[in-house]
Amino acid sequence: MEKSQASLSNLSTILNQTDMELPIDMRFNEGHMVSIITYSILMVISIIGNSTVLFLILQRRRSNRSRINTMLLHLAVADLMVAVLMMPLEIGWAITVSWRAGDSMCRIMAFFRIFGIYLSSFILICISVDRYYAVLRPLLLTDVDRRGKIMLVGAWMGAILCSAPQMIIFHVEVHPNYTWYEQCITLNSFPTGGHELTYSLFGMIMTYCVPLIVIIFTYSSILLEIYKKSRESVHDKIRRSSLGFLGRAKIRTLKMTIIIVLVFFVCWTPYYIMSIWYWYDPKSAKSVDQRVQRALFLFACTNSCMNPIVYGAFNIRTNAKKSMRAPTLETRVTPLSLSVRLVD
C-alpha cells in the first residue's frame, strides 16, 4: 500500500515537472485566462444582440419583406454561428490548451472556426453593394430581389469554399518531445513557408481588405450622392421643410457611414496587426506578453458583437421612425427618395 502511494506520488511529481518544462504557449497561462474571460463575455453579448435582432426582423418580415431585412437576417445568423460555434470552441481549447477531441473533430471545428467570420464579412459586402445600387443605380432596381438572392447565395457559397481548406490543412499532430501532448495545427500541411504565408494573406484579403474597401467605397459614394441631391434640391427651390429633411438625412447617413467604417476597422485591425507581426517576425512576436497577444487576437470576434448594433438596431430604429413619417413627405422629395431611404 505504501509502495503504491509512493509510486503515485512520484508519477504526479514527474507530470508536474513535465508540465513546467513545456514552453509557455503549450501550457495554461495568463493569456488563456484572458481568452476564457473575454470570449465568455463576447459570447453572451453576441448571442443576446444577434438573437434580439433576429427576433425583431422575423417579426417585421410578416409585414415588410425588404431586401435589407433579409440581408440583416443572414448577417445575424452568421454572427450567431460565430457566437455558438467558434467562441465555445476557443473557450474549451483555452481551458485544455492541448487538443483532446481527435483528428476528425479537429478538421470539422477548423472549418466552423472560420466559416461564420467569412460569411459575416461577405454579407457585409452584400449589404454595402445593395445600398450602393439602391442609391446610385436606381434605374437598375428591376429584378433587384433576384440580384439580392444571388448575392446572398454567393456569400454562403463563398464562405463554404474559403473555409473548406481548413479541413485539409488542420490535423492533429503529436509533439515529438512530449508524446502525450497533441495539438490541432497546420504543421507539415504546406510545402514551404511561402505557401503558408500565401494562404494566411488570402484569408486576410477576403475577410478584411476586400470588405473594408467595398464598405468605404459604397458608403462614401452614397454620402456624396446625398450631398449632390441636396445641392440640386436647393437650386430647384424645394420647400424649406423638405430641405430640413434632407439635412437630417445627410447627418444620419454621415453618422452611419462613419460608424460602419470605424467599427469594421477597429474590430479587425488589431487582429491583423498581430497576425502580420507573426508572419514577418515570429520570434519577436512570441516575446510579447501572452495577455496582450490574446487581447489583440480577440478583437476580431468583437465584430460579431457590434454588427447587431450598427446594422441591426440602427436600421430597425430607422425603419420604425420611417413607418411613422407622413407619406406626403416622401412624395415631395421623390428625386432623393432612393437616396435617403437607405434601409428599404
Image (tube, rainbow, N blue to C red):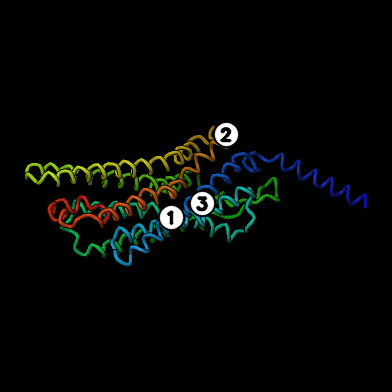
First of labels 1, 3 by sequence position = 3
Decide if residue 295 is on the left or right side of residue 183.
left
The amino acid beneath tag 2 is: Asp
Decide: is 192 above or below 338: above
Residue type indicated by callout 3: Val
> Dot 1, crowdedness within 10 Å: few (<14), some or many (≥20)?
many
Q: How many residues crowd mark 2 within 10 Å: few (<14), some (14–19), many (20+)? A: few
Looking at the rendered image, the disc whose residue lies closer to the viewer, 2 or 1, is 1
Callout 2 touching callout 1 (CB < 8 Å): no
Q: Quadrant of residue 251?
A: top left
Helix, strand or loop at label 3? It is helix
Residue 317 marker: none
> Depth check: 163 or 307 in front?
307
**Residue picked out by circle 1:** 50
Determine which residue is flagged by label 3. 44
Q: Looking at the image, which residue is at 47% across and 52% down?
A: 46
Q: Mark 2 points at which residue?
A: 289
Q: Nearer the viewer, residue 91 or 187?
A: 91
Question: What's the CA distance linking mark 2 and mark 1?
Answer: 32 Å
Residue 135 vs residue 11, the one in the foreground: 135
Give whichever of discs 2 and 1 has the lower sequence position: 1
Identity of the residue drawn at 57% across and 45% down: 37
Q: What secondary structure is found at the residue carrying circle 2?
A: loop
Residue 209: percent from the left, percent from the top?
A: 36, 44
Relative image position of residue 157 (x, y in whole percent):
38, 61
Height in image: 76 above or below 291?
A: below
Judge from the rendering whether residue 299 lies leftward or rightward of residue 145; answer left or right: right
